[in-house]
Image: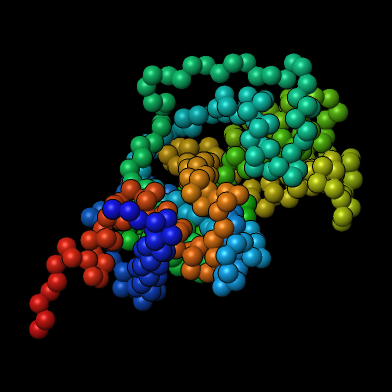
Amino acid sequence: MHISGRHVQRLTQQVGTGLAQVRDAQAAQQRRRQLKPRVAEAPPVAVVEVDGGRLGTREPGRGPGVQQPQAKEDKVAFLLGMRSQVHPEDPHPEPPPAFRDHPRVARLVRQIKARSAPPAHDQGPGTEAPAAAPRPARPARGQPQRLVRTCVASMHSSEAFGPLLAAEAQARAFFDAPRQAFVADGQHYNWSLQRAYFPHFEPIADFLHVLCYLYPAAWAVQPEAAAQWQQYEAWMTACWQGRVSAVVAELALGQERLGRPPPDGEALDRRQLVHEALTYLRHNAPRMDYPRYRRQGLPVTSSWVESLVGEFNARVKGWDKWWNRGKSAEAILQVRAAVRSEDDRLARYFTERPGNPYRRHRPTP
């Protein structure tokens, strides 16, 4: 049977719109306190991670082609049930080798903070970290066991996204889990979501973003490449071990020595880089007690949701992908979220949706 690409597009939008209606109905039930969990029991550990991506949109109703293109943010949440151990002491008091690998760290900073990443050529001789040890055959000590993940994605504002996320967590009995974690970067709206909808979850600032502020700040306060890398390692290790206040004090001294940045300073102004790192750590210090989180068997990075955003981008982002602002962009995100969720929700939707010939109808009373 031949089916044109345009027909597949129409069917996909129809399915995505239906999935959005199911999602919104679930959120409405949650607001009325009528939503019951769809799982038999809560996971031992409930993890919610939130991040955002960007996709290209176009103005609908203006004929073929891309009219009035504009990049818009989509919000993506990763909800994972997992099993992990609780430890009397920190199971990983030293940072992983990956955080001491200079080329890898520099590449990560350029990916996450491209605008304020130091030039790549500033990795001078003698700054390379020793080769990482081969990966052990067995899982590392304290490594958690992933159970089931589901996804929530939307083009909505953070105010509208919160109820959708809370409803998905309620449906998976996350609020009854013995241990709970909410992991995100330093965006203000992430912590507004946490305070409003997940107040009992442990708030954890993503360590990868902390690293990406420390590396440029070390480049700013030290004149030579070798000293810059040593400064980064010292600050990174201190934050990993929970000594955030000591790093804040040193950054404050560096800011005093360099001076405050001008209001219209450039992204790579050394004063600006130190100011950004100092501000970030001061705001997120209460969410950076990483030794305690590791003892509780909780994640300290948002790498899971970062990877999930990449999986979304692989489908919705590209030079040739432009989605109509409104229902079209929202619909494709729902289909992608259903495909990437591990609870068979797409198959369940096809089975239960109205008009399905395989759906068992109740007799009319």
Left or right, residue 265 beside residue 133: right
The answer to whether one can see residue 347 in this image is yes
**Quadrant location, the C terminus:** bottom left
Position of 135 with respect to 271 (left or right) is left
Counting from the top left corner in percent of width and height, residue 49 is at 49, 50
Q: Position of residue 248 (x, y in %)?
A: 73, 42
Question: What is the number of callouts on the image?
Answer: 0
Q: Position of residue 341 (x, y in %)?
A: 36, 50
In this image, 74 relative to 359: left or right? right
From the viewer's perspective, tell me whether residue 294 is left or right of residue 283: left
Residue at the image point whose x is 65% and y is 61% from the top: 70
**Residue drawn at x 82%, y 42% as measured from the top left:** 268
Q: How is the image coloured?
A: rainbow
Quarter where residue 174 is shown? bottom left
Residue 365 lies, with reference to residue 25, above or below; the image says below
Residue 180 visible (yes or no): no
Residue in view at x 49 percent, y 65 percent = 328
* Residue closer to the observer: 90 or 205: 205
Q: Nearer the viewer, residue 69 or 262?
A: 69
User: At which x and y percent is residue 10?
Assistant: 41, 64
Residue furthest bottom as drawn: 365
Q: Tell me the quarter of the picture where residue 19 sits.
A: bottom left
